[in-house]
Amino acid sequence: MPLPAIQKPGPLNIGLMGGTFDPIHMGHLVTAEEARQQFLLDYVIFIPAGLPPHKSKEQVTPAEHRYIMTTLAVMSNPFFVVSRVEVDKKEPSYTIDTIRYFTSRFATGTNLFFITGADAILEISTWKDYTELLKLCTFIAVTRPGYPLDRLDEITGKLLPELRARIHLLEIPALAISSTFIRQRVALGRTIKYLTPEPVEQYIKKHGLYKKEFVNCGNRL
Ligand code: ATP
Ligand code: MG
């Protein structure tokens, strides 16, 4: 993965954004861009999951398609890059494995920021080796429309203060888009223009992705 050549005094700030990206959409991109600006990140690395631990093979589009779509989506942003670290692994990756990998890859002192939906933070105590995770990187928990956060204080309140201090909330412009929503729309033959970048939309069309998604979404679309 070629990284942008950044010349600056002091340590780099690097954002890491993991996801299934099935497919990547404007919600992901707006989130990464907002995090980049607010947290003075030098760049953001998108990390498409290989086979996510919580999803089975049948439920997820092959990793190579998701990797290519993510690459197409970030092409126009010089501060965004895509990593194959999880895609190239046969077994599912836990976040801690990926963060350990990046910790070893970058110079000592590099600040790593893991960008994730705030809803995921509600489950933090179930993540593998989460205390080490919070020591290795700062979490940027993005508030996502439709996910109530009243339990967040309660959850993070149970963490040691020095770990709690590693979680920052970031409010982003409301974009109630999800990959599920896009997949369902494609299955219904409805437009996904402006929900995902145009090259991704074209790729989905060309490869006939998401056509057979089982849909039961009433009149939500
Ligand atoms: P799915 O509907 O298949 O679950 P998703 O839209 O949630 O897909 P993921 O690839 O699972 O996408 O998400 C990757 C990360 O991006 C997660 O941390 C998730 O919380 C966050 N995210 C997804 N959609 C949005 C959005 N619209 N705004 C902000 N963050 C988002
Ligand atoms: Mg999701």
Image (cartoon, rainbow, N blue to C red):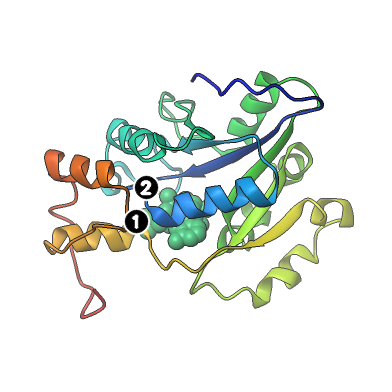
* Among the 4 quarters of the image, the one containing residue 79: top right
**The furthest residue to the right:** 161
Of marks 2 and 1, which one's residue comes earlier in the chain? 2
Q: Separation of disc 2 and disc 1 at Cα?
A: 7 Å
> Where's residue 22, x and y in %?
33, 47
Q: Which residue is mark 1?
A: 179
Kindly tell me whether mark 1's CB lies below 8 Å from ligand 1.
yes
- Three-letter code for the amino acid on which mark 1 is drawn: Ser
Nearest the viewer among 76 and 192 is: 76
Query: Image height check: is 207 above or below 195?
Result: above
Residue depicted at 36% across the width and 40% down the height: 73
Q: Residues within 10 Å of mark 2 (few under 14, many from 20)?
A: many
- Three-letter code for the amino acid on which mark 2 is drawn: Ile
> Where's residue 81, x and y in %?
49, 31
Residue depicted at 44% across the width and 57% down the height: 27
Residue 24 image label: 2
Residue depicted at 64% across the width and 48% down the height: 37
Residue depicted at 15% across the width and 59% down the height: 187
Kindly tell me whether mark 2's CB lies below 8 Å from ligand 1.
yes
Residue 72 image label: none
Q: Residues within 10 Å of mark 1 (few under 14, many from 20)?
A: some
> Where's residue 117, x and y in %?
55, 58
* Helix, strand or loop under label 2: loop
> Where's residue 140, x and y in %?
66, 52
* Among the 4 quarters of the image, the one containing residue 105: top right
